[in-house]
Amino acid sequence: MRPLQAEHVVAIAKPTLDAAECCFLTTPGDSDPTSTRLMHHVKPDADLTVWFGPSLASRKVREIRRTPRVTVACLDPTRPASAVLAGPVTVEERTEQWRRYWREDWQTFWPEGPSARDYVLWRFACERVEVLSFPVGIAPAPYGIRPAVVVRHGDGWRLAVSS
């Protein structure tokens, strides 16, 4: 088996996110230590930037305003693979981005589309990735107890020690 490369771990994380219909987004909670919500996301960019479209009235918006660091976790429904990402979330202010990252199935929540007053767009900038993927052999011995972990380092990624 070849040595694990950081870029390979990132390359496996993207199709895992692509295959997942939803992700769990975890923030520090209002009254509980953490608050997790299942959210639809827009398929990630090549650099693992993930986009979300929450309602301005949601609890998540309050939590993000207070502490903009989150964890995003997803499971590939087609194979035994998962990805857990961590990083900051920022609110995207440009309306052209709101249209670019709009999902048609969000029309149920915002009939007016991406110009709805209650719609906002979040940009999640991945800084850390943990991946387990049995089909491609990213499941360190003995049975995938420790994921492969990479962290953003400048414009690239480097392997980190998982715990």
Image: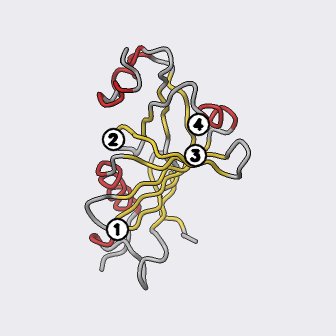
Against 94, residue 19 (above or below) is below
Q: Residue furthest right?
A: 31
How far apart are the two marked residues, 3 and 1, measured between alpha carbons?
Answer: 22 Å
Label 2 packing within 10 angstroms: few (<14), some (14-19), many (20+): many
**In which image quadrant can residue 81 be found?**
bottom left
Height in image: 38 above or below 139? above
Element class at badge 1: strand
| CA distance for labels 4 and 2 | 20 Å
Query: Dot 3 corresponds to which residue?
Result: 70
State the residue position of label 2: 43
Name the amino acid type tagged 4: Lys
Q: Say which residue appears at 45% left-offset and 68% top-offset.
A: 148
Q: Amino acid at mark 3?
A: Val
Q: How is the image coloured?
A: secondary structure
SS label for mark 3: strand
Judging depth in this view, the residue of 52 and 94 nearest the camera is 52
Q: Residue at x 32, y 68 (%)?
A: 80
Is the C terminus in the top left, top right, bottom left or bottom right quadrant?
Answer: bottom right
Front tag of 4 and 3: 4
Q: Earlier in the sequence, mark 4 or mark 3?
A: 4
Q: Residue 133 bears which disc, if any?
A: 1
Given residues 40 and 144, the one toward you in this image is 40
* Disc 1 to disc 4: CB gap under 8 Å: no
Residue corresponding to mark 4:
60
Q: Nearer the viewer, mark 1 or mark 4?
A: 4
Q: Residue at x 36, y 74 (%)?
A: 3
Q: Amino acid at mark 1?
A: Ser
**Mark 2, secondary structure of its residue:** loop
Which badge, 4 or 2, comes first in the chain's sequence?
2
Residue 136 in picture, x, y percent from top left: 28, 70
